[in-house]
Image (cartoon, helix red, strand yellow):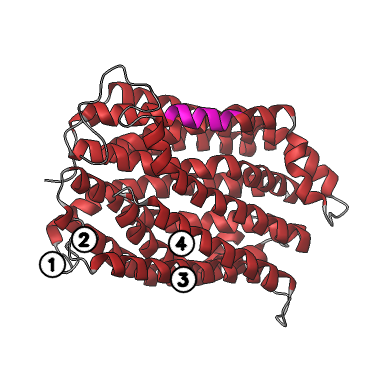
Amino acid sequence: MNGYSLSSPDDESWWRRPCGGREVLRLSLPLVVSMFSWALMHLADRTFLFWHSEYAMAASMPAGMLHWSMLSFPIGVTMYVNTFVAQHHGARQPEKIGAPVWEGVRVGIFSIPVFLATIPLAPFIFRWANHPPELQPLESLYYQVLAFGGGAAVISGALSAFFTGRGVSRVVMVIDCTAVVVNLVLDYVWIFGHAGFPALGIEGAAWATVAAQFVKLTMYVFAVRIAARSGDFGFITGRRSDFRLLGKLLYYGGSNGMQMMIEASAFTVFTLLVGRLGAASVAATTMAWNVNAVAFVPLIGLGTAVSALVGREIGGGRIGGAERATWSAMMLALVYTSVFAFGYLLLPGLFLFTYSYGAGEGFEEVRSLAVVLLRFVGVYCLFDAINMVFVSAIKGAGDTFFILVNTVVVSIVFLGAGWAGVEYFDAGIIWCWWVLTAWICTLGIVYFLRFQFGAWRTMRVID
């Protein structure tokens, strides 16, 4: 019965009980390792760029955030295939799994021309944001190259959901970690100009990311083809377009994608706002976010596991199991994040040592500011963990419309506060980070309350 006995005694330990710590860790650990490897890749990527040029590193953050803003809606739709797969898996309907995966792949294919159409717009966007003139061409170039890999990332999201929704997370770990290694090797070769290649700087970093996305997509295609040969998952019967299923995916996944896009766009606007305060502010913000990525990004893997477990339990009609899985994940997330929270508060400078290599004259100013910003991270990262676990749980049930509405309201309130402070009261980078901290803490509190008192227990995305 989905890997455990439903007759387990009520007094079974938190660790061993169904949907307890051991089961959550077993499913989430490969995904956490996968996301941790991506966090280390981005940290190394930005560190390489910093060694190449402080301007290149500073430009990579707003350009990367803009790219993620464009990517987030279609990838939010395709990643929600995870919930459809998990609920069919929990309801013992494996023959219905292939159809939503196919619809997710189609969404990814349709997104490709959209990404390519944004390439000419990049210079106008960064000029409109009024960033320093020395950053604008680098930002535009970085975004324009990344746009070529957008479609591969979206399609990979749909194919990975076939594995995560069924709890086969080791396949995702192997594929994602392989792509990370490819990215890191190409970063070193193409940024600095080794092995006979010219030194491309920020352009080389972007092409390395694109190449890694296509390597990942190729591996997912082969892995899915191998699984589909058994005929157990309905890939052959489900390959025809099903407009009713596509409508359901766009309704639930579209709300998820819109939420991700609005949230990503809000943080992009925040980054663009910080960019108006000067290169030092945006470089210090980039450093702080890069360092925190090692703590935060693995939580995305844990969140994916929570959504899959909640979806599986709801698909099987076991609401208690969904609740246990969520609280088990919450305990694991708080233990993991607390280590970083205390480190950021007590020893923030320790996390910035990699940037000191080859640093220029202005490094000490940037480093001193980044130390202050990391203390803000130490305050809000625990709420980030709460946010990730509870929002993933209610997503796994299908409560995506509430998440969308909450994202819109909270983003408008706090972005407005940040913009007003900078525009009318000459507030600086510290004000922006106070706003950011309050923003993230509010999200964590709202999603905790929604999990406790919301209607997710009665929701279901499959028939």
Q: Which residue is mark 1?
A: 237
- Cα separation, mark 4 vs mark 3, equals 11 Å
* Disc 1 packing (10 Å; few <14; some 14–19; many ≥20): few
- Closest to the observer, 367 or 10: 10
Residue numbers of the magenta segment: 330-338
Q: Amino acid at mark 1?
A: Thr
Of the two numbered discs 3 and 2 in the rendering, the one whose residue sits closer to the viewer: 2
Of the two numbered discs 4 and 3 in the rendering, the one whose residue sits closer to the viewer: 4
Q: Residue furthest right?
A: 361
- Cα separation, mark 1 vs mark 4, equals 27 Å
- Cα separation, mark 1 vs mark 2, equals 8 Å
Answer with mark 2 or mark 4, whichever residue precedes in sequence. 2
Whether residue 333 appears in magenta in the rendering, the answer is yes
The residue shown at (44%, 32%) is 387
Q: Secondary structure at mark 2?
A: helix
Q: Position of residue 291 (x, y in %)?
A: 65, 44
Marker disc for residue 214: 3
In contact (CB < 8 Å): disc 1 and disc 3 = no
